[in-house]
C-alpha cells in the first residue's frame, strides 16, 4: 500500500512538472507580437544623385533594394516621409533613388547608380524604385531605371531617397 501511494504521488509530481514545462499552444495563433517593426520612408524633397548618401535622417541610412524589396515586414514613417493625398499610412506612389549593390555605373541599365552616388550630371543615370500601389504587388517596390532618372533630377520626377532605419 505504501508503494502504491508513493507511486501515485510520484506520478502526480511528474504530471505537474510536465504541465509547467509544456507550453500552452492553444492560444499561440491568436498571440501577436508587440515588437516594433523597422521603419522606412521616402524623403520629402527631391534629391540629386550626389546627395543620396547623406539625405536620410539620423538613425536611418540610404536603403538598398534588398533591404526594402519586401515591405510586409516594415512600416512606413509618415512623419519623416513624403505623403500624397491618397497615401493612407503607406508610402506615396513616387520614385526614389535606391542602392543597387552594383559597381560604379552611370549608363541606362538596371545597375545605374550615379557613379556610386557621386554624380549630379544630367548625362549620368541612377536607379529608382517606386513603391507598389498595385493590387498584385502591394508589399513590394517596383525596381527600374529609365532615361528620366538623370542624376541631376532634371527629368521632372522629383526623385527622393528611400531610407531605412538602422
Image (spheres, rainbow, N blue to C red):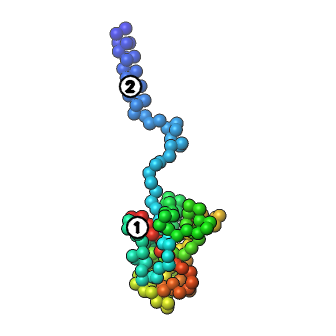
Q: Classify 116 as above or below 58.
A: below
Q: Which mark is residue 60?
A: 1
Q: Classify 112 as above or below 2.
A: below
- In the image, residue 68 lies at what x, y percent? 49, 66
- In the image, residue 137 lies at what x, y percent? 60, 65
Residue 82 seen in the figure: yes
Give SS at disc 1: strand
Q: CA distance from mark 1 to mark 2?
A: 52 Å
Give SS at disc 2: helix
Q: Quadrant of the C terminus?
A: bottom left
- Residue appearing at x 54%, y 75% in the figure: 95
How packed mark 2 is, by other alpha carbons closer than 10 Å (few <14, some 14-19, many 20 or more), is few
Task: Classify residue 145 by image quadrant.
Answer: bottom right
- Residue appearing at x 49%, y 64% in the figure: 79
Q: Which mark is residue 14?
A: 2
Q: Quadrant of the N terminus?
A: top left
Q: Which mark is residue 89?
A: none
Q: In front: 99, or 17?
A: 99
- In the image, residue 70 lies at what x, y percent? 52, 64
Q: Classify 16 as above or below 116.
A: above
Amino acid at each position: 500500500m505504501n508503494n502504491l501511494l508513493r507511486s501515485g504521488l510520484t506520478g502526480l509530481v511528474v504530471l505537474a512538472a510536465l504541465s509547467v514545462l509544456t507550453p500552452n499552444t492553444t492560444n499561440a495563433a491568436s498571440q501577436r507580437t508587440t515588437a516594433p517593426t523597422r521603419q522606412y520612408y521616402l524623403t520629402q524633397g527631391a534629391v540629386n544623385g550626389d546627395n543620396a548618401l547623406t539625405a536620410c535622417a539620423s538613425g536611418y541610412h540610404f536603403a538598398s533594394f534588398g533591404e526594402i524589396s519586401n515591405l510586409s515586414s516594415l512600416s512606413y514613417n509618415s512623419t519623416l516621409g513624403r505623403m500624397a493625398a491618397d497615401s493612407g499610412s503607406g508610402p506615396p506612389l513616387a520614385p526614389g533613388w535606391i542602392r543597387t549593390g552594383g559597381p560604379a555605373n552611370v549608363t541606362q541599365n538596371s545597375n545605374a547608380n550615379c557613379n556610386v552616388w557621386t554624380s549630379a550630371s544630367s548625362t549620368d543615370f541612377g536607379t529608382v524604385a517606386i513603391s507598389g500601389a498595385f493590387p498584385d504587388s502591394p508589399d513590394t517596390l517596383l525596381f527600374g531605371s529609365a532615361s528620366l532618372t538623370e542624376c541631376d533630377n532634371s527629368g521632372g520626377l522629383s526623385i527622393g531617397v528611400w531610407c531605412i532605419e538602422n
